[in-house]
Amino acid sequence: MAAKTLKLNVAGSEIAASLESKIGKDDLYGRVEQVVEQEGKRLERGWLLPDGLIFRKSQVAMTSVDPEGSPAESPEIFCAGQKQELRPSSFDGAEALEPVPLETLARFATTDVYPIGAGGLAPGLYRGTFNYRKSARARDALLLVRDDGAFLLVGQVKACPMVGRTVAYEFFDAAGTAAEESGDPLDFSMM
């Protein structure tokens, strides 16, 4: 797949970046593909119709149609009773990015990773939004720029506090002192 061009707006200057293919499990761990062959020719999935015709998988396309077979209108999207407008794809405009502290990366739940060619950006972490396709809700995005490359991380920023040195189960100690103060010890002989 060829790289797509993404326009980034950082501190008032627009930078053209090339977005490469998403990094998936197959890229990290490899992939096993099952191939069915007959007489050295690779076979393809398809459907056998009742009248004996065969449709290959590549010959079938999907679209939304009404009961008469005419193309259907695009669906309306509602959230909490309010109609939502579709936000354009990030490739159709310029995405605004702002520098954020590196600790933001610890609170980010990443779902997709894209290598990106973003020359001209200083190393650091930038936050913005990203929509691969037109959708009602933009997804959170972080652009991690390092000396050896840059990655666009897509997902969601979680509102979790940083963990410190605290006792996780203080209520066990509090429950033990309350039982001792009542004067009625609980043991298994009472059963």
Image (tube, rainbow, N blue to C red):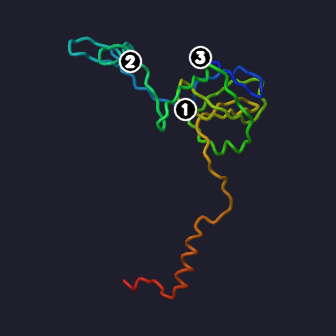
Please provide percent x and percent y for residue 51. 20, 12
Q: Nearer the viewer, mark 1 or mark 3?
A: 1
Left or right of 51 in this view: 22? right
Local crowd size for mark 3, using a 10 Å CA cut-off: few (<14), some (14–19), many (≥20): few
**Farthest residue toward the left?**
51
Across and down, in percent, residue 12 comes to 77, 25
- What crowding class fits label 2: few (fewer than 14 Cα within 10 Å), some (14-19), or many (20 or more)? few
Mark 2 sits on what residue? 72
Is residue 7 something one can see in this rendering?
yes
Q: Which residue is mark 3?
A: 2
Q: Quadrant of the N terminus?
A: top right
Which residue is at 55% across, 30% downward? Answer: 27
Locate the C terminus and report the quarter of the image it occupies. bottom left
**Looking at the picture, which amino acid does disc 3 mark?**
Ala
- What's the CA distance linking mark 1 and mark 2? 23 Å
Residue 40 visible from this viewpoint: no
User: Is residue 23 placed above or below 71 in the rendered structure?
Assistant: below
Q: Mark 3 or mark 1, which is nearer the start of the sequence?
A: 3
